[in-house]
Image (spheres, helix red, strand yellow):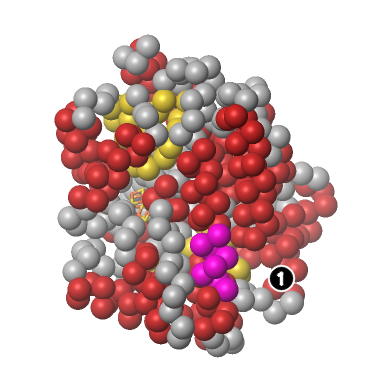
Amino acid sequence: MATNNYAKMWKDLGINLEAHDGLLRSLVQGHSDVYLSQENRPEGMKYLDFVISEIHGLRIQELLEAKKQGRKVIGTFCLYVPEEIILGADAICVGLCAGADIGVEHAEQVLPRNTCALIKSFVGFKLANLCPYVEACDFVIGETTCDGKTKAYEMLNDYKETFVLEIPHMKSEEDRTLWRSEIRRLAGKVEEATGRKIGARQLRQGIETVNAKRAVLQRLNSLRRADPAPISGRDALLINQVQFYDDPVRFTEKIDALCDELEERIEKRVGVAPPGAPRILVSGCPMSAPNWKLPFLVEKNGAVIVAEESCVGERGTRNLVDTRGETVDELLDAIADRYLQIDCAVFTPNRERVDHVREMARSYKADGVIHYVLQFCTPYAMEAHRVERALKDDELPSLRIETDYSTEDAAQLETRVQAFLELMS
Ligand code: BJ8
């Protein structure tokens, strides 16, 4: 990225240029070490590399251009916030979850140390004025998922307007009623902020755009069932991460073309690892960009990650919104119903997540499962035991990893990963 070209843009956004340079340097280095070092990548990944190389440049420029044309930019942190509603008001949705530990010392001045890395990262980014996406947003939408996020949004609201959506923690009919009314409250907020009424035609268009994006990611996932794997887990993760920032229509077209290429590779039996390489399913907490630590350690030791049971993965792409509704009310209910199916660990009971892990392990022919938990994430740490028990019943080896965004534990993690992969050789 030609940083000089963007320095004025970042300065105008109030970015701390010195700290931001450090963030970009580590991003470029991480991308080079983890991604560009791979051999035999699909050609289509060049687009994703380009997006990453311009992640705080060209895309931010596009957002600011759109704002000049009168569109709003709205930030989100969670899969429960429907992009369809934001698109229905001709606004732009950007995912703000962050996966870097730069800014953590700022976050720890106001948050307990035993807060998960994802929360520390987004709070730290705001306090240190590090993220042009946050600064480009007109407002952000939070949600009452885990306690840490719920309370962090109170703090974030002191610096950036934060609208908080109430997420029920159960899935009874009463919860559905609450959730449907929250979806309407959100639509009202988006209409008020954008000054645009969400009509049925625009909402349907928003639904179709997001359905198309999810459908292409489903296509990508289904191609990863092949052996040899036509694409690495690292690259698939990058695609899943970029979907939260990129223009959804352009992204869908590019990934569709990449899938065509993967189909050809499968036909010619071209893979990123030899046939029979250990196939790993990763399950648990989301990995936001540039959190690439674990996939790198797994794949540099000869295994291939074939699927992610994660919000940056299949939990986010499973299920499309039913488009049969004709009125705004019917479409909003269809959106609410689709989103209530998400099996985040903040729900109770949450048996469907365990079923999904087992089902994914079977369908992707995984040889083992890594249960990935961000340190201090109680919901996923609590569910780990239930997941492990189910996998034991299926006679599938599993490994529990608890970590954060720092690289301090990389050597120790690698030793554990190597020992785990030996079980499969
Ligand atoms: S739908 S997983 S994106 S809440 S890791 S902040 S849960 S303490 S990210 Fe999440 Fe929505 Fe659920 Fe997905 Fe809390 Fe855990 Fe931290 Fe987490």
Q: Nearer the viewer, residue 301 or 404?
A: 301
Which image quarter is the N terminus in? top right
Q: Report how many numbered discs are placed on residues in the image.
A: 1
Q: Main secondary structure of the magenta part?
A: helix
Q: Quadrant of residue 164?
A: bottom left
Q: To which residue does mark 1 refer?
A: 66
Q: Residue at 19% across / 57% down in the picture?
A: 348
Q: Nearer the viewer, residue 373 or 310?
A: 310
Q: Is residue 130 left or right of residue 62?
A: left
Q: Is residue 83 above or below residue 376?
A: below
Give the image location of residue 135, x and y in percent. 61, 63
Q: Is residue 370 left or right of residue 197?
A: left
Q: Residue at 61% across / 76% down in the picture?
A: 90
* Residue 98 at least partly seen: no
Give the image location of residue 86, x and y in percent. 53, 73
Q: Residue furthest right?
A: 5
Which image quarter is the C terminus in? top left
Task: Please state which amino acid type lies under the numbered disc 1.
Answer: Ala
Q: Is residue 221 above or below residue 370?
A: below
Give the image location of residue 243, x and y in percent. 57, 53
**How many other residues sit within 10 Å of disc 1, few (<14), some (14-19) or many (≥20)?**
some
Q: Residue furthest front?
A: 267
* Residue 268 at least partly seen: yes
> In the rendered structure, which segment of residues is drawn in magenta?
205-212
Give the image location of residue 39, x and y in percent. 65, 22
Q: Residue at 57% across / 41% down in the picture?
A: 238
The answer to whether residue 207 is magenta is yes
